[in-house]
Amino acid sequence: MYGRGLSLRLAIMFTCQAAFALFGYNQAVFSGIINNADFLAIVHYPSTAVMGIIVSIYNLGCLLGTVVAFLTSDNLGFRKSVWLAMCIIIIGATVQTSSYSKAQLLVSRLFTGIGIGIMTTTVPVYQAELCEARKRGMYVCTQPLAVGVGITIAYWYDYGMSYVDGPINWRLPIASQVIVAILVIILILGLPENPRWLCRQHRRQEALQVLCEFYDLPIDHPTVTQEAENIFRAIDDGRPEYKWSEILKKDELHTGRRILLAYGLQFTNQMGGAPLIVTYVTTVLEDNVGLDAKLSLLLSGVIQLMFVIGAFYPIFYSDRLGRRSPMMWGSFGLFVCLLMISILLSFKGTNLEKSAATASVAFFFLYMLIYGATINCIPWVYGPELLPQHVRTKGQAIGISANWLWSFFVNMISPTLIRDLAWKGYLIFVAFNLAFIPILYFYYPETANLSLEDIDSLFGVQKAQPIREDDKGFTWVESRPVS
């Protein structure tokens, strides 16, 4: 359907981007809805704690989705897993759109989250395992860029619909995600299955054919044969099963440690304060900064646009600058931004209140620019890279579970932080961002430009020979056991 070589690689990238744009849209669409009068009437004007549950239960559903992916993805593969996810999202969005009670909305948001959780576990592994090593950062980082696009579309959609009267001004934005889900289902029809998954299913000839189509090379070309040999060796040498009881035990592949590292990346992604800014920035601008509702919605859309601008940076530079350095500098940048926001908002009740609060808006802009360029993008490529072949999908499910668990936590407490603690609430995330810097420096290895099989060498499993390029510019590595 999509041909071979470059056209196929672009089709894979675009499909993954569309799926992640849907993820971003879902993350942000409620930001402009939670203060909507018609919506508040439907949910009976809830307290801040109950509103936190209404918003965050979606993240709890996403967490359950990672459990479903953990249990099913190795059997279903990429295509069927994403089809399942999109069908769940369509059903959940349909019920959300037609909600006329708090209970109906809660259940449908939970259900939609399950689909998003399955998708966000499966898609990054597929893209990471089906791209050239030297461009893996670029390809996978287009997915978080798509998240930013989805978030921005959601904010501007909400802003536009705020001028429309009646329930359609919040029901239509929720319903519109169905269009993207159907598009993803159609796009997947022409994509190949993951060659590493095919090998694990003892379908090696099909895996070879996928590699030939992906690179647009004959089956006996060194690029194809070398990558196939690396995959076969990793599967043959890998452990057939992974037991939960071994998660903290030190095996020859350091599996437990690597899963915990992947988990830590997504913990960093969320506990830096991003869910508060992504989901509640409109409320923050109204309650903490003191802006009116329309201006808050408008500025929120522009703030999220900074996310998209920042997300272009790792696409072009993550494979040059690596993974660790951008993560550390990103944590430092978020630390500074949130510290300045906290300081400036602390002048409330003084003569400097208005000017200081207005100045704080600049740091919300800067926060989203830095977050989009670093902490949001890098974990999605870094996590699958760190995981060994035999647990990559399940390990990714565990890693992504951190994203949803801590996003649920931050989304749930954010209304209380904003309205009760005000500027003091931001200090929680200031402390976390500062703590992340030494952890990233001392515990995380650099993985850029290595094949997935040769990343094992960073954990003492094998030694990689220098990376070479063939006549078409593709990177491949010869490996041999550590002597």
Image (cartoon, helix red, strand yellow):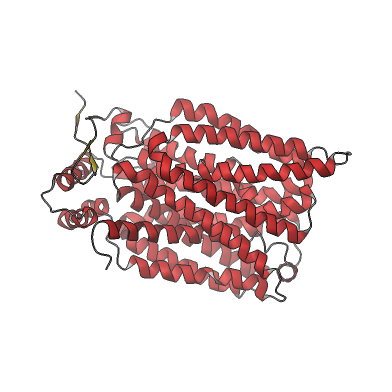
In the depicted structure, whether residue 152 falls above or below residue 391: below
In the depicted structure, whether residue 417 falls above or below residue 173: above
Q: Is residue 14 left or right of residue 171?
A: left
Q: Position of residue 435 (x, y in %)?
A: 58, 30
Q: Residue at x 29, y 60 (%)?
A: 7
Q: Is residue 141 left or right of residue 101?
A: left
Quarter residue 118 falls in:
bottom left
Answer whether residue 217 is visible to the viewer in this image: yes
Q: Residue at x 49, y 61 (%)?
A: 22
In the depicted structure, whether residue 478 falls above or below residue 397: above
Answer whether residue 322 is visible to the viewer in this image: no
Quarter residue 28 falls in:
bottom right
Quarter residue 242 falls in:
top left
Q: Is residue 252 left or right of residue 279?
A: left
Task: State the quadrant of the C terminus.
Answer: top left
Q: Residue at x 31, y 32 (%)?
A: 251
Q: Position of residue 20 (x, y in %)?
A: 46, 57
In the depicted structure, whether residue 398 falls above or below residue 3: above
Task: State the quadrant of the N terminus.
Answer: bottom left
Tell which of 272 and 362 is nearer to you. Answer: 362
Which residue of the protein is positioned furthest toward the top in this rendering? 483
Q: Position of residue 117 (x, y in %)?
A: 47, 56
